[in-house]
Image: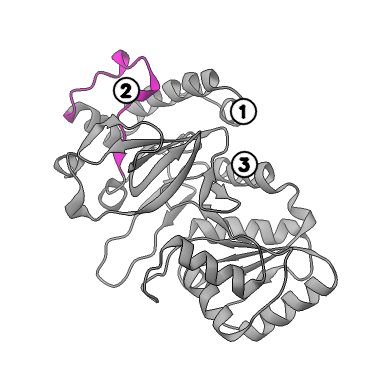
Amino acid sequence: MNQISAAQIFSIKTEEEFETVALQVFRYQAVANPVYRKFLTALRIIPEEIKQMRDIPFLPIEFFKSHEIWCGENVQPEVVFSSSGTTGMSTSKHPVRNIALYEESFRKGFRLFYGDIRQYSVLALLPSYLEREGSSLIYMVDALIHESEKPASGYFLYNHRELYETLVQLRDQNEKVILIGVTYALLDFIEQYQVDFPNLIVMETGGMKGKRKEMIREELHLALTTGFGVARIHSEYGMTELLSQAYSKGNGIFECPAWMRVLVRDTNDPFHYLEEGRTGALNIIDLANLHSCAFIATQDLGRLNNRAFEVLGRFDNSDIRGCNLLVQ
């Protein structure tokens, strides 16, 4: 049934190629993914009648908490990624039928935006992710640390003194360094230590994980640029439900790899899209999600800016209009 290959997905270069492959993936998943198939039936969608990408229905991301979202009949997933959550919260689960797709996606995506990983020492400050199982972020960072082949690359749990000394040493050696950190842990670090390292790439992965009060991006990035002595803060946009990442090299403007797209929907009408510059909810097309669902309606608010996008916040379940009636 499935005639789509990884080579097709990761060799996309034009909008026309993206649309062609997206429609192929949609037709495959409309049949092979039981949950998505039922969702389309509930919407009275006939897959054969979908002729353009913008008409493809997007599955509300909440389904990953209540259903197994994958084209997985008669096969077993190679890995199941899961989201973090506080006690009593339901968490998202993403069964991954072919882990090689994820590995190719994050490797090609990183190379696209940052070049050869072997040029960098990769330091990771991700305590809340390390302290649980099933994190897709940790899976990716593990690979990047290993492939960097630099002796300083590795994790720093709560040992901020060791991280500080490593940063100072690498700065003095004029090494290229990426520090990947969950937001609250980066803030915890700069409350103890200040580093003047202008060439350091600080990449925040978002999230206070209930550890700190949420901050607006401008306030957060001002604190981090001051604490690390850098001109701008980079960011990674990823989630359990996606097998691709978008990256921002500053000012919160994210760019996607060629096999990923973002659309902005009206929060009051999930089937209506907004033009550039208007704020709405983000719909993500991630073609690396070949064997789960490539068309996801997230709970993130944002806006488009010439194929790039900003993330402006999130809305709660109580704020969803339209899609909530479809979540069973």
- The label on residue 104 is 3
Q: State the residue in front, 154 or 253.
A: 253
Quarter occupied by residue 322: top left
* SS type, badge 2: helix
- The label on residue 55 is 2
* SS type, badge 1: helix
Comparing labels 2 and 1, the label whose residue is closer to the camera = 2
Give the crowd class for mark 2: few <14, some 14-19, many >=20 residues within 10 Å: few
Q: State the residue in front, 108 or 246.
A: 246
Q: Residue at x 68, y 70 (%)?
A: 154
Q: State the residue in front, 219 or 127.
A: 219
Compute the Cα span from label 3 to label 2. Answer: 28 Å
Coordinates of residue 179 in the picture (x, y in percent): 64, 66
Q: How many numbered marks are there?
A: 3
Residue 257: say if magenta. Answer: no
Give the crowd class for mark 1: few <14, some 14-19, many >=20 residues within 10 Å: few
Q: State the residue in front, 112 or 153.
A: 112
In this rendering, is residue 1 above or below 261? above
- Residue under label 1: 7
Amino acid residing under circle 1: Ala
Start and end of the magenta stretch? Answer: 42-60
Closer to the chain start, of discs 2 and 1, is 1
Give the crowd class for mark 3: few <14, some 14-19, many >=20 residues within 10 Å: some
Compute the Cα span from label 2 to label 1. Answer: 25 Å
Label 3 with label 2: CB-CB less than 8 Å: no
Residue 125 can be seen, yes or no: no
Q: Residue at x 36, y 24 (%)?
A: 54
